[in-house]
């Protein structure tokens, strides 16, 4: 059985037929053919002719147990989302719903997101790392303030005034 080669026939392209797809009749021997009887006996010969590759179009398929629902969404938001992430609507909506059910979401948007980006934070992992560093610095500051208080007490007992 012939399998899709995910390439268009370069000979058909040269005569103006741009979307004639190649198939592999015998994949083990790299025999490529098109419906117009153009044959390429090996892969290297075909690659020298620079065939146009067929772009893989991802399509979302429901998972076992998925159900179809109808929801209302702002048209402009949906159009923009679909232009940025074609074929990702189902997975995204499912992930967001799952996150809200099973996770502990933190949503940052607008001004806060811009401020974080300006500070160099690009994702959640960097946000967590920044907060861990801030907490570590707070702990160090508290330790150093405790040491300063001890030294101030020692200087006061020795009769030395701390500089103002």
Image: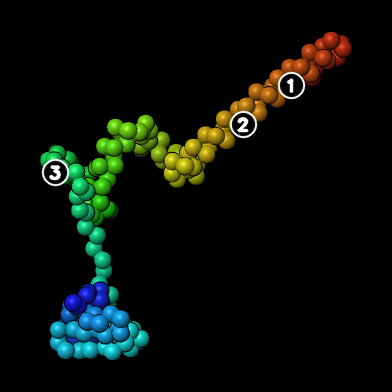
Q: In which quarter of the image is residue 138?
A: top right
Mark 3 and mark 2: Cα distance apart in space: 49 Å
Q: Which mark is residue 137?
A: 2
Looking at the rendered image, the quarter that the N terminus falls into is bottom left
Task: Check disc 3: other Cα within 10 Å, few if <14, some if 14-19, many if 20+.
Answer: few
Q: Mark 3 points at which residue?
A: 68
Q: Quadrant of residue 133?
A: top right
Q: Which of marks 1 and 3 is in front?
A: 3
Residue at left offset 35%, top offset 37%: 109
Residue sitting nearer the eye, 92 or 25: 25
Q: Nearer the viewer, mark 3 or mark 2?
A: 3
Marks 1 and 3: CB-CB under 8 Å? Answer: no
Q: Residue 38 carries which label?
A: none
Q: Tag 1's secondary structure?
A: helix
The mark nearer the N terminus, 1 or 3, is 3
Q: Is residue 122 above or below residue 54?
A: above
Q: Residue furthest left?
A: 70
Marks 3 and 2: CB-CB under 8 Å? Answer: no
In this rendering, would 11 be left or right of 43?
Answer: left
Q: In which quarter of the image is residue 70?
A: top left
Q: Tag 2's secondary structure?
A: helix
Mark 1 and mark 2: Cα distance apart in space: 15 Å
Q: In this view, does 59 lie above or below 11?
A: above
Task: Check disc 2: other Cα within 10 Å, few if <14, some if 14-19, many if 20+.
Answer: few
Q: Residue 147 carries which label?
A: 1
């Amino acid at each position: 059985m012939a399998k899709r080669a995910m390439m268009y026939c370069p000979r058909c392209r040269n005569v103006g037929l741009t979307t004639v797809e190649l198939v592999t009749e015998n994949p083990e021997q790299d025999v490529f053919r098109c419906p117009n009887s153009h044959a390429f006996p090996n892969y290297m010969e075909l690659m020298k002719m620079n065939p146009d590759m067929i772009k893989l179009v991802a399509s979302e398929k429901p998972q076992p147990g998925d159900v179809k629902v109808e929801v209302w969404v702002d048209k402009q938001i949906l159009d923009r989302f679909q232009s940025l992430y074609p074929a990702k609507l189902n997975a995204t909506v499912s992930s967001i719903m799952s996150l809200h059910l099973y996770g502990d979401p933190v949503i940052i948007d607008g001004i806060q997101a811009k401020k974080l980006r300006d500070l160099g934070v690009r994702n959640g992992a960097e946000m967590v790392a920044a907060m861990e560093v801030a907490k570590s610095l707070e702990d160090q500051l508290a330790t150093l303030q405790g040491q300063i208080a001890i030294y101030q007490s020692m200087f006061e007992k020795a009769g030395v005034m701390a500089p103002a």
